[in-house]
Amino acid sequence: GQSLEQPSEVTAVEGAIVQINCTYQTSGFYGLSWYQQHDGGAPTFLSYNALDGLEETGRFSSFLSRSDSYGYLLLQELQMKDSASYFCAVRVPFTGGGNKLTFGTGTQLKVEL
Amino acid sequence: DGGITQSPKYLFRKEGQNVTLSCEQNLNHDAMYWYRQDPGQGLRLIYYSQIVNDFQKGDIAEGYSVSREKKESFPLTVTSAQKNPTAFYLCASTKIDSNEQFFGPGTRLTVL
């Protein structure tokens, strides 16, 4: 099976930098994804890391260390609109073929003035 | 505009009744998924379909059923056998070799 751990809540001020960590245990691993979900809304894709290292997309960056089963999402120049839940998800083989995502329980980010 | 639609957004049912949630996509994606989300929790996979007329149970399939008669459509039936059906249900789709899943707006089901 798979298990993921991420902090339940993080608070930061507008303009700051925040890092959301994710550790995972899984049998079979293709990569680590990050999704953003605003209250009552649909999750939206932020990033995917299959290889070790840092991937940067605008204000957001994501890091993966396969040897440490660890990744993080880095959000820079925080804005009020970044207040949302952030989920890490491991992409793993599916027993019936193909692959699936297993999600963590999410980190609620609150951005304050 | 391409996307995924789910209807209705809110659904109320009496205990013991089956209910079907609709999911339609016009993204020409092969794979479709159903997830359940409970308050303060992550998404849990209910069912998964890679191609038409084929689907597979996810992690919490008990009490649910699906069909995939068309590429665009993947309806989910919540049966009376599902012991705690009140939840937020999300449908998603993706190209087979893609890393990104696209989600619909979700259906919030409340069983009274």
Image: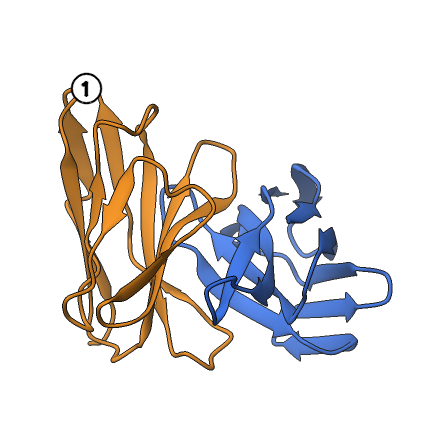
Its colouring scheme is: by chain
SS of the residue under disc 1: loop
One can see residue A22 in this view: no
Q: What residue type is labelled 1?
A: Glu
Is residue A3 depicted above or below A78 in this figure? above
In this rendering, position of residue A67 left or right of residue B68: right
Q: Is A49 situated left or right of B86 in this image?
A: right
Residue A73 vertical position relative to residue A2 in the rendered view, above or below: below
The residue shown at (65%, 37%) is A8
Chain appearing in orange on the rendered image = B
Residue B31 shown left or right of residue B20 in the figure = right
Residue B7 appears in the figure: yes
Determine the colour of chain A. Answer: blue
User: Looking at the rendering, in which quadrant would you find the N terminus of chain B?
Assistant: bottom left
Query: Which residue is drawn at the image coordinates 65% and 70% (left, top)?
Result: A31
Q: Position of residue B62 (x, y in %)?
A: 36, 37
State left or right for residue A90 relative to residue B4: right
Number of numbered discs on residues: 1
Q: Which residue lies furthest to the right in this view?
A: A67
Q: Mark 1 points at which residue?
A: B15
Quarter of the view holding residue B81 = top left
Q: Where is residue B80 in the image (x, y as percent from the top left)?
A: 21, 27
Residue ID at (21%, 34%) = B79
Toward the viewer: B87 or A38?
B87
Residue drawn where x is 68% and y is 48% of the image: A4
Judge the density around disc 1: few (<14), some (14-19), many (≥20) Cα neighbours within 10 Å: some
- Name, please, the residue furthest toward the front: A96
Which residue occupies the foreground of this view, A67 or A76? A67
> In which quadrant will I find the C terminus of chain B?
top left
Q: Nearer the viewer, residue A3 or A19?
A: A3
Position of residue B53 measured from the top left corner of the image (x, y, whole percent): 22, 68
The chain under label 1 reads B
